[in-house]
Amino acid sequence: MASGDRGRVQGRQSRYASERHRDHVRVHSQPAPARHPAGKNFIVTHEPTFYNHFDDTKGLEDDPVYRYKQEFIRKNNLVLWRFHDHWHARKPDGIFVGFARTLGWEAFAMKGAPGASHSSFVMPPRPFAEVAREIRSRLNTRSMRLIGDPNTPISKVCTMGHELSGAVRLVRDFDLLLAPEVREWDSVEYLRDLAVAGGNKAAAILAHERVEEFGMEECATWLRTFVPEVPVEYIPSGEPFWGIPNNKGQARPSNRSRPGANGKSSNEDRRVIR
């Protein structure tokens, strides 16, 4: 099995996978006690339970959050199975099928594009601000951040990975990069410098959960096709971020300006889409 799945069972001993899973199966992107409904004890999760890729709990043994979560798992006889690499390896990638469906961009999905199927799109050109409003509405996100001129024409869109190398490679061929969980000190600065230098490119920085959660809804739908005897319920994790609006009901923009390509001050950092 691929490294991310490894058939790993968290919580009680693995015998519960055979003895207890007939009650209910719940599917979501991030496991958390606050989102556990009564009676659903087999959890298929896309991401780790204990905060790192391999669920290595060394050093967490005395941490109160870790102990609370472990006790919750034990008390409720939960079984957690991480379904990551295999779901991404599906053709087409199950995560991005759900993402494209939620955006309403299935018809725009590029065939033979770099990266996972349904993660790259080509569409009639529109201004960046218009595309950004659509993304914000369709994903129902409250934490999206934007880089680039609002009037930049957008036709080719790609979802990048978490590393700067992905941005450097993809930005040559795409107008807009959808960037989930990137590091601000490398990828964001590179994309901002590119925009300021007149690169005519744009980026939308999204929460990791807002990109992948809809793919786990797709997973629940898929599971129901071959395990009809077990109730399967998709339970969204929900976006973890929220913001404090200013007195105009907008997220407060930065007051800093930044030199533009012509050496003059740019108001780019103060733009807010409405």
Image (cartoon, helix red, strand yellow):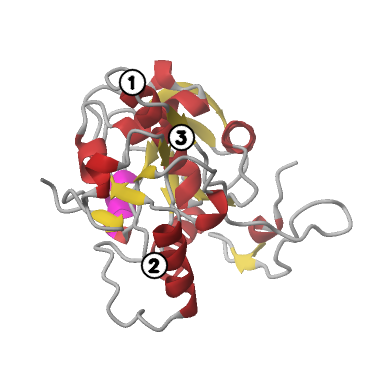
Q: Using residue 155 as the reference point, say whether residue 274 is left or right of it.
A: right
| Label 2 SS | helix
Q: Main secondary structure of the magenta part?
A: helix
Please give the residue where the numbered disc 2 appears in the rendered image.
186
In the image, residue 2 above or below residue 151: below
In the image, residue 170 above or below residue 121: below
Residue at horizontal 29 percent and vertical 57 percent from the top: 10
Q: Position of residue 262 (x, y in %)?
A: 56, 60
What is the distance, in whole Å, between disc 3 and disc 2 at their CAs? Answer: 27 Å
Sequence-wise, the earlier of marks 1 and 2 is 2
Q: Nearer the viewer, mark 1 or mark 2?
A: 1
Residue at horizontal 59 percent and vertical 31 percent from the top: 138
Of the residues shown, which amino acid type is indicated by label 1?
Answer: Glu
Q: Is residue 99 visible?
A: no
Q: Position of residue 114 (x, y in %)?
A: 23, 36
Numbered label attached to residue 214: 3
Of the residues shown, which amino acid type is indicated by label 2?
Answer: Asp
What is the distance, in whole Å, between disc 3 and disc 1 at their CAs? Answer: 24 Å
Q: Nearer the viewer, mark 3 or mark 2?
A: 3
Sequence-wise, the earlier of marks 3 and 2 is 2
| Label 3 SS | helix
Q: Tell me where the magenta segment starts and ends, as one range.
A: 165-171
Residue 168 is inside the magenta segment: yes
Q: Is residue 136 visible?
A: yes
Please give the residue where the numbered disc 1 appears in the rendered image.
229
